[in-house]
Image (cartoon, coloured by chain):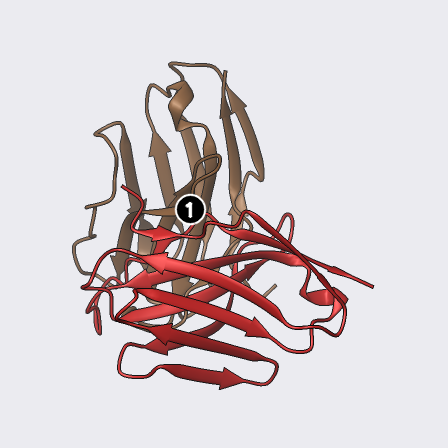
Amino acid sequence: GAGVSQSPSNKVTEKGKDVELRCDPISGHTALYWYRQSLGQGLEFLIYFQGNSAPDKSGLPSDRFSAERTGGSVSTLTIQRTQQEDSAVYLCASSSRGGRETQYFGPGTRLLVL
Amino acid sequence: DQQVKQNSPSLSVQEGRISILNCDYTNSMFDYFLWYKKYPAEGPTFLISISSIKDKNEDGRFTVFLNKSAKHLSLHIVPSQPGDSAVYFCAASAGQMQGAQKLVFGQGTRLTINP
């Protein structure tokens, strides 16, 4: 399809395990964002990638969270030593070039840490 | 610290009537505001936006009003249709014409249109 895709759609893990979440942005979009939505909260910005520039990691809640974007396309968000408070829906969005270009969101990955 | 607040978790409106969704913000640096719509199991989709230099923006059945002095914006849907039933998120950003547009979202309002 032409939209943003994310995998897996659901992930259940045990506290202390590492998880990897994947995002495939819209082809040709140079900007990629990760957000998360905890229960009862709005979406919270995590990290931003734009082309070959250094990512803006200002929203990452702790050093257990990291993300990379390979080849300017697919991105992986990794959470190490997961905690129960990491349970949330993790959403990826892409836009054609950042700034005020419309962000197109994927369906999200629902993460549950037991 | 919730910088963008949607104080109504849900709203029910009869088909054909006007739906009004409200949003308040606290950060005076916000200068760009958006509404997103979300269906179950899908990501949010962009609906309409407004820059702080305007107080109204209209797109078909959807109109967004911005009251900067009150730090308040609203989304009007007229007439409301059953397909409008969804969760609506208000979002805001500050001075990011380039680079990361870090959207700050409200908690969402679930709108239900009754036939």
Find chain B in the image and tell me its colour: red
Amino acid under label 1?
Gly
Q: Nearer the viewer, residue B94 or A100?
A: B94
For disc 1, the neighbor class at 10 Å (few under 14, some 14 to 19, many from 20) is: many
| Quarter of the image that includes the N terminus of chain A | bottom right
From what the image shows, is residue B73 above or below residue A114?
below
On the image, the x and y values in percent for residue A26 come to: 47, 65
Residue A2 is situated, as x and y percent measured from the top left of the image, at 57, 67
> Is residue B41 depicted above or below B49 in this figure?
above
Q: Residue at x 51, y 54 (%)?
A: A106
Q: Residue at x 31, y 45 (%)?
A: B2
Q: Residue at x 21, y 72 (%)?
A: B98
Say which element carries label 1.
Answer: loop
> Color of chain A here?
brown
In the rendered image, the vertical position of residue A31 relative to residue A7, given as above or below: below
Q: Is residue B18 above or below residue B36?
A: below
Toward the front, the furthest residue is B70
Which residue occupies the foreground of this view, B92 or B66? B66
Foreground pick, A107 / B33: B33
Identify the residue position indicated by label 1 in the image: A42
What chain is tagged by disc 1?
Answer: A
Could you tell me which residue is drawn at 54 percent across and 23 percent down?
A12
Q: Quadrant of residue B52?
A: bottom left
Horizontal side of residue A70 vs A104, given as left or right: left
